Image (cartoon, rainbow, N blue to C red):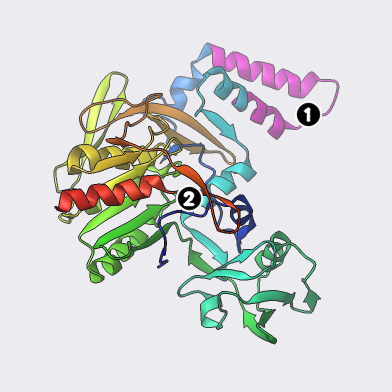
Amino acid sequence: MNKQNNNYKGFNLTWVISIVIVTSIISAITSGVIVYNNNKLSYDTTYGDLSKDEKLNEFLSVYANILSNYYEDIDKSKLLDEAIAGMMDYLGDDYTTYLDDDKTAELFDSLSGEYEGIGVSINNIDKSIVKVYDNTPAQKAGIKEGDIIIGYNDIDVINMSATEIVELIKSSKNNFTLKLKRGEETYSVSLKNDTLIAPNIDYYMIENTNIGYLSMQIFSNTLKEQVESALKELDSLGMQSLIIDLRDNTGGYLTAAVDVANIFLKSGQKIYGLEYQNEITYYSDNTNEHKDYKIVVLINENTASASEILAAALKESYGAKLVGETSFGKGKVQQTMKLEDGSMVKYTSAYWLTPSGNCIDQKGLNPDYYVENSEITDSEGNTVINDDQLNKSIQVLKEIAN
């Protein structure tokens, strides 16, 4: 749990760039998508149907002739990749695309909610440890925040970048040794990478209040577990109302958004609807758990997709207030189909609707309180962002309580 001692976030550019999460705790490369897994051929198309398709047979005939008669050797895999990419491009939809095997792996890694690593983040400038995560090899080995990495096995890493050190650690399949400096002392620890839950949240109590703060960075497979754990700790600290920060959260798995909504909503309350070929189906909470906190949800222009689904459900079904700026406005759902070579096609299959039936595509969610953050100069002359949106959220919850 992180504790914030002031009401502005230090989005100093140097600081943001300097933080590197060891062993692939990476930002989600979701392009605002909602990922819906689908490995079936189709809902209503069979291979028998395709065998009768004259245009498809014509395509196969062209493909066969190219392979047989083209004057140079052909890479069949690349040829078909280009054909698939062409189909996706023809549809003219920003969220319908072809991803090669590397991009597919990167996407699913970011959404899995797990990573192989030791559980620290480091500063790219001086290679000091910025954060040691709980229940990780680094914590168990006694590594502390502020320690500086100076060696890996027998390699001096003082002149290496944090990224290069990360790659060394990521490549380790067995035990390895890190040499660190703590103050004037140096010490060495033996470590081995482990499968860890990627931290997708940040949470703390707002000082001198009974208001909890919970931010979510990506809707991964492990998000519900992390949110439940955070709420349990915040409850133990006397939380009576909650700020949920979805700013800059570009989305992820639809199922993760539903799982988190189920934590807060009462059974039977609508979460979202899907409009597919003029038919609308609504999906509601079907769990016994719910919460009674007063909630404010922070949103901005980068709040997209699954984040917008959760924000809309909390606003329209739970009664939460939205603070910040108009959200991105991604009102479409994608399905994915993974191909045998590890690549994937991602295509739009439906519009999603808010519980009251609104489609926000290219419109976004409008906040109840529109607030933009302002820039200030700190005592050292650095420009930082004054978090007026967070301050407004605190004010709104205090007014509700009174």
Q: Which residue position holds label 1? A: 74
Q: Residue extending furthest right? A: 71
Q: Is residue 209 left or right of residue 252?
A: left
For the residues carrying marks 2 and 1, which lies nearer the camera in this image?
A: 2
- Residue 268 x/y as whole percent: 14, 43
Q: Seen in the image, is 203 located left or right of residue 235?
A: right
Q: Main secondary structure of the magenta part?
A: helix
340 to 181, vertically: above or below? above
Can the viewer see residue 245 in this picture?
no
In the image, residue 267 sits, relative to residue 156, either above or below, namely above
Three-letter amino acid code at the position of disc 2: Leu
SS for dot 2: helix
Query: Residue 75 occupies which quadrant of the picture?
Result: top right
Circles 2 and 1: CB distance less than 8 Å?
A: no
Reading the image, the residue beneath label 2 is: 111
Q: What span is in magenta? A: 55-84
In the picture, the quarter occupied by the N terminus is bottom left
Q: Position of residue 246 (x, y in %)?
A: 38, 46
| Residue sitting nearer the eye, 65 or 386 | 386
Measured from the top left, where is residue 248 in percent x and y? 46, 43
In the figure, 367 relative to 213: above or below? above
Q: Residue at x 20, y 29 (%)?
A: 356
Q: Name which residue lies at 68% across and 21% down.
A: 63
